[in-house]
Image (tube, helix red, strand yellow):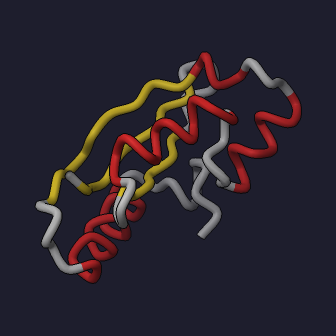
Amino acid sequence: MQGIYLIADTSTGRLYVGKADGAERFLGRWSEYARNGHGGNVALRELAAADARHRQHFQFSILQVFSPSAPSAQVDAAEAHFKRALLTRQFGMNLN
């Protein structure tokens, strides 16, 4: 399945909204976070660089699930919606 997820940093309360799409979907994205602590995201990379164990403070939630055949535009629109609704660009860890 593909979809939109939320990472809550339980030590700061800051949120990050991401999408799991493409061939790897949720398992692939979350495996990447487990492996390196940042999944390639700029704000999370900064946290990992400051403290490699900071990922222990992350709590993952699924916000919305889409079928594997859902159009990428639909998944992108949902991700943008949750970023706006949760104010993660202004007060969270989404830089774009």
Query: Which residue does the image show at 63% across and 32% down from the upper left?
Result: 35
Q: In this view, does 96 lie to the left or right of 59?
A: right
Count of labels in the image: 0
Query: Where does residue 11 sit, x and y in percent of width and height?
Result: 62, 19
Q: Which quarter of the figure is the C terminus placed in?
A: bottom right
Query: Which residue does the image show at 37% across and 70% down from the upper left?
Result: 80
Query: Where does residue 71 sit, x and y in percent of width and height?
Result: 19, 80
Residue placed furthest toward the right: 50
Quarter of the image for residue 14 reads top right
Query: Where does residue 43 sit, x and y in percent of width and height?
Result: 71, 50
Q: In this view, does 26 lie above or below 85?
A: above
Query: Where does residue 6 sit, x and y in percent of width and height?
Result: 39, 42
Asked whether 45 or 12 is in front, the reply is 45
Q: In this view, does 79 lie to the left or right of 46?
A: left
Asked whether 38 or 9 is in front, the reply is 38
Query: Which residue does the image show at 20% across and 51% down from the upper left?
Result: 1
Q: Is residue 35 above or below residue 80?
A: above
Query: Which residue does the image show at 11% across and 61% down from the upper left?
Result: 67
Asked whether 44 or 86 is in front, the reply is 44
